[in-house]
Image: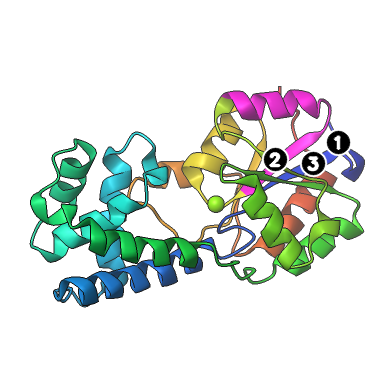
Amino acid sequence: MNYTMQNAVMLVDADNTLWDTDGVFANAQLALLTEIEALSGIKCPEQDRLAYVRRHDQALAAVHHQHLKYPIQMLGSSLLSGLNGQTAEDAATALVNGRATRVSFKTAIVDRAISHYADALGKIPELLPSVIEGLQAAWKRNISIIVLTEGRIEKQRSTIEAHHLGGYFSGVWEVKKDREQFERLCRRFDGALVVVIGDQPDRDIVPAKQAGCMAVLVPSRFRPSWRTEADEQAADFVAENFSIAIKWSIDATDGDYPTRR
Ligand SMILES: [Mg+2]
């Protein structure tokens, strides 16, 4: 069946696909480490400071039931435990099980650093390269682009506003990215080819493919430890940047593609 541009819909991930959320996190995480070092008087023993913080971040995400949405105070406590000699894994397990060591209860240090960390996380992220070009290409072809986010919708809306991108999107939707939700979205756009574009294979690509969407991966710098090769290979196409992803999607929807059922 041939799809035409009138019945193609592109569902686009926001964080690390449209804008550099990872960069905001990196700056905030480095500043957090610096502040906890200063407050505790203990220097980070490793040269790659960002990797050090991220090991603590990923260890917490791996054991906390809210995954990457674990309470941010825990990262401060975990780093403080780390500077005092504990491994990231031991610190994370202790914090999640409520068995934190005495040192991580130095809440005055953690609280102070965490309030600055929260402010730094609230910064507006920069747009990633070629995003405007990609959005313009879709806009010229009259393609409906909807932002899909698992994060807070107000945050995504304010980033869109700050970059004056409102005119390019038909909507910003907060959804849990699993197979059922993508199936629901496919039913909603019944008859249209639904293309999902995102940077995270396990969140954007695998469930979208399971639901019968077309899926384009734009790999970002943010690579969590649980990311697998197999997940990456599930994508219909791996694009170097957003604009290439949009142009490939336009070509694909112009071409001859099997129906999704
Ligand atoms: Mg993302």
Task: Give the camera-side residue of 69 and 12.
Answer: 69
Looking at the image, which residue sits at the far front? 108
> From the viewer's perspective, is the residue at label 1 or at label 2 nearer?
2
* Up/down of 195 relative to 155, above or below: above
Amino acid at circle 3: Val
Residue 241: horizontal and vertical position, in percent?
A: 62, 64
Disc 2: which residue: 173
Task: Give the camera-side residue of 172 and 110.
Answer: 110
Residue 89: horizontal and vertical position, in percent?
A: 17, 48
Q: Is residue 97 magenta?
A: no
* Up/down of 203 relative to 79, above or below: above
Task: Give the camera-side residue of 140 and 40.
Answer: 40
Amino acid at circle 1: Asn
Q: Is residue 228 visible?
A: no
Instruction: Assign the C terminus to one quadrant of the image.
Output: top right
- Left or right: 180, with 70 as reference point: right
Disc 1: which residue: 2
* Up/down of 228 relative to 120, above or below: above
Q: Secondary structure at mark 1?
A: loop
Q: Which residues are magenta?
A: 180-197
Disc 3: which residue: 9
Distance, label 2 to label 3, CA atoms, is: 14 Å
Residue 203: horizontal and vertical position, in percent?
A: 51, 41
Distance, label 1 to label 2, CA atoms, is: 28 Å
Q: Is residue 189 magenta?
A: yes
Amino acid at circle 2: Trp
Task: Give the camera-side residue of 25 and 31.
Answer: 31
Q: In terms of sequence position, does the residue under pointer 2 or pointer 3 come before the other?
A: 3
Task: Please tell me in which quadrant of the rendered image residue 50 appears.
Answer: bottom left
